[in-house]
Amino acid sequence: MPGGWTVIKSKHLSIFIVSMLPIILLVILSLVLIVMIVMTYGVRSLAHYETKKQEDRDKASLIQGWLYSGIVATIIAIIASIYFLVKGTPYEGHLVEWLNIVVRVMHITFGIAWIGASFYFVFLENALNRTDNVRDELAGNLWAVHGGGFYYLEKYKVAPKTLPKSLHWFKYEAYFTWVSGLGLLFIVYYFNASAMLIDPNVMKLTAAEAISISIGSFVVGWIIYDQLCKSSLAKRPLVFSIVGVVLLVGFAWFYGHVFSGRAAFIHFGAMIGSIMVANVFFVIIPAQKAMVNAAKNGMPPDASKGKKALLRSIHNNYFTLPVLFVMVSNHFPSTFSNRYQWAVLAAISIGAAGIKHWLNLREQGKLSVWVLPASILLLLAVAYVTAPKQVSTKCREVSFIEVNAIVQQRCVSCHSSRPTDNIYTTAPNGVKYDTPQEIVFKKDLIMQRVVITKTMPQNNKTNMTLEEREIIRCWIEQGAVIK
Ligand code: HEC
């Protein structure tokens, strides 16, 4: 029947087209990307050489801004369509891993640039020569030698009489750190919420619930902090600090009772990091813009705005070390796997902020006797309480056959050259337990993750028992031999 034949044919055709959609989309997106990149060169030459009129230049840089945003959006769309192409194949894990590498390196790079600049300016402020040979309009100056040259820097009390043609701003480092950090949250935690974000032993959540709590907590954290800074408390630094610390401990406690251990740590850092970026975006940069505008119009700047910006920037300064610790904490299961991990997190954060306080005092030439020792003592106390507990239970002779059976049952669903786990399609961190040798070689790491910190199997997905952990411990203590 000719009619039926066309139906079948068109059905095949539509299936074919649907299956080709991601590739067609990919080709179109790539073309759009190339066109936009070429356009940026055109606009760039317009902005820099051909016209000298400020108006045209402003227009060109506006277009440039839109083009860059378009390029970023297109790259994200391209990655998304590649993701749908490889979803469910072994390439999915590989794609996510490379996304992780690229975005992580970007995050670290922007973070270093941001915190580096911030440390540098705090240092300048603290080390400025304010007395010796300082012109009237200046707050101070500073000589420095670096990279084979001498540098001389001056800070103005208010603003120069005429604004310089090019004025450097430091803001994109902060914004890009935040954007790349959010990207990492998606790549590591949101895409894989059931494995990375949620620990059913802590709280049974769906992926949608966990992600909503995650994002919501950042917004709530900022609102509370911002209101606190605007309240009268801000005028009393000691009370403000105490309230701030109590609130932060509360957040650490909350995250520790909602998410998996490592996700709880990262969220604490991401929440504070978001506050830091919001401080730059909503308070510090607007204050600087107002200052520049006032200087353009020959008006004195609004001192209250400058004061508010300074307060936020001091807070950011104290946040840096705790956030840096959190960002590397994923490597240290003894911290995030502790039963009272929220207290561990809070104590390390307070100790780290204490060390920053001491560094600040020192740069200002002030001598403090107790701040550094107290901070170090606190950190040492944390190291002490997180130390492995001595287990006194006697071991019977354990055979490798027993150990191997446990490993096969509890570990190889993920750690194998052919994992059967629904999420991990390649062996995590390259750790495989397919042969006896592979188990023996990794005995120290197994001791650390299975016996001491009990952070493997991940979220105890394969329901390993305490008795099994004891058998593993005994086998390793008896020399981890294959017999
Ligand atoms: C549900 C999947 C899953 C199971 C089951 C699992 N692991 Fe893992 N394992 C992971 C993931 C994911 C990582 C990487 C992330 C991390 O280090 O926490 C990992 C990392 C490790 C590491 C750290 C490697 C390194 O380079 O630091 C060791 C050791 C390890 N696992 C041992 C085991 C042992 C032993 C078992 C069985 C008792 C086990 N795992 C069961 C998912 C799993």
Image (cartoon, helix red, strand yellow):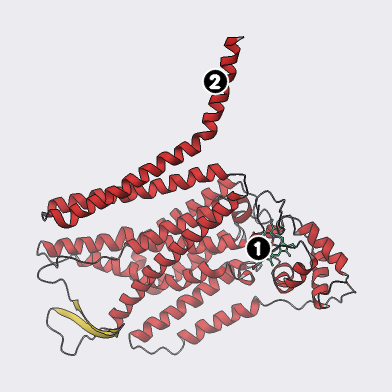
Q: Is mark 1 within 8 Å of ligand 1?
A: yes
Q: Residue 401, which numbered label?
A: none
**What residue appears at the point 52 percent right and 34 percent down from the top-left corner?**
20
Dot 2: within a 10 Å radius of its alpha carbon, few (fewer than 14), some, or many (20 or more) residues?
A: few
**What residue appears at the point 39 percent right and 45 percent down from the top-left corner?**
74
- The residue where tag 1 is placed is 430
Q: How many marks?
A: 2
**What residue appears at the point 20 percent right and 66 percent down from the top-left corner?**
167
In this view, the residue farthest toward the front is 2
Q: Quadrant of the N terminus?
A: top right
Location of residue 190 in the rendering, given as x and y in whole percent from the top left corner: 54, 51
Residue type for callout 2: Ser
Q: If you read the primary sequence from the N terminus, does the residue marked by circle 2 or circle 1 appear first?
A: 2
Location of residue 131 in the rendering, given as x and y in whole percent from the top left corner: 19, 88
Label 2 close to label 1 by CB (< 8 Å): no
Q: Is residue 255 left or right of residue 298?
A: right
CA gap, disc 2 and disc 1: 46 Å
**Residue 441 at least partly seen:** yes
Q: Quadrant of the C terminus?
A: bottom right
Q: Residue 10, which numbered label?
A: 2
**Residue 225 at least partly seen:** no
Image quadrant in which you'd find residue 241: bottom left
Residue type for callout 1: Gly
Location of residue 195 in the rendering, given as x and y in whole percent from the top left corner: 63, 53
Image quadrant in which you'd find residue 223: bottom left
Circle 2 sits in a helix, a strand or a loop, which is it?
helix
Give 240 or 43, whichever is nearer the viewer.
43
- 144 lies above or below 37: below
